[in-house]
């Protein structure tokens, strides 16, 4: 597990990300907006992947990313913290939710979300409302929307 800055603020957590370009874009967003990033392994790619490096450019500082070897390790570390799951299966819009400055906002794997057992254990589940018949936004876009709202509500930006 890599340790990162302990500054207070929202944390973006990615569950077993599998598209390098999306993860790289999320790293850039977190870097530019001052959010901490946490990655629950395994990743579906290596950080040396050329597709990843092309998007992340010089924004990658692995010391600022916390890696968890498994979801078990992640949930053990977070047992006394609030986790918000972003999911298309939620009934509550993120616009109707009050974010706290130390929230961990969890995004599922691009190809499959999070497993049902994890989905059921998380108390706070939110969605980004979309027009009818639209399946989902790109995860990097979703992270940007939710992170901006969290930072706005908590007056951290």
Image: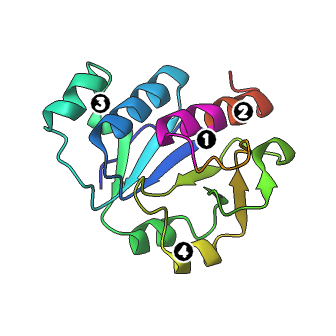
- Residue that sits furthest to the front in the current view: 133
Q: Residue at coordinates 86% horizontally, 46% vertically from top-left?
A: 96
Q: Are marks 4 and 2 in contact (CB under 8 Å)?
A: no
SS for tag 2?
helix
Residue 131 point in image, percent of width and height:
73, 42
Q: Earlier in the sequence, mark 1 or mark 2?
A: 1
Closer to the camera, 68 or 131?
A: 131
SS for tag 1?
loop
Q: Earlier in the sequence, mark 1 or mark 3?
A: 1
Q: Quadrant of the N terminus?
A: bottom left
Q: Residue at coordinates 26% horizontally, 18% vertically from top-left?
A: 58
Q: Earlier in the sequence, mark 4 or mark 2?
A: 4
SS for tag 4?
helix
Q: Residue 117: which quarter of the image?
A: bottom right
Q: Residue 128: which quarter of the image?
A: top right
**What residue does disc 3 label?**
61
Q: Quadrant of the C terminus?
A: top right
Numbered circle sitting on residue 71: none
**What residue does disc 4 label?**
118
**What residue does disc 2 label?**
149
Read off the magenta span. Answer: 136-146
Closer to the camera, 55 or 155?
A: 55
Q: Are marks 1 and 3 in contact (CB under 8 Å)?
A: no
Residue 152 point in image, percent of width and height:
75, 27
């Amino acid at each position: 597990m890599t340790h990162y800055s302990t500054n207070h603020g929202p944390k973006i957590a990615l569950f077993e990300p599998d598209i390098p370009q999306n993860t790289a874009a999320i790293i850039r967003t977190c870097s530019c907006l001052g959010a901490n990033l946490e990655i629950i392994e395994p990743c579906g790619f290596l950080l040396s992947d050329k597709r990843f490096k092309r998007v992340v450019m010089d924004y990658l500082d692995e010391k600022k990313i916390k890696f968890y070897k498994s979801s078990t390790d992640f949930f053990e570390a977070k047992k006394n913290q609030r986790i918000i799951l972003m999911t298309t299966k939620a009934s509550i819009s993120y616009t109707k939710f009050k974010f706290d400055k130390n929230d961990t906002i969890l995004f599922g794997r691009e190809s499959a979300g999070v497993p049902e057992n994890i989905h059921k254990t998380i108390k706070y589940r939110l969605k980004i409302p979309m027009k009818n018949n639209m399946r989902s936004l790109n995860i990097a876009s979703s992270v940007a929307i939710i992170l901006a709202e969290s930072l706005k509500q908590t007056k951290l930006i």
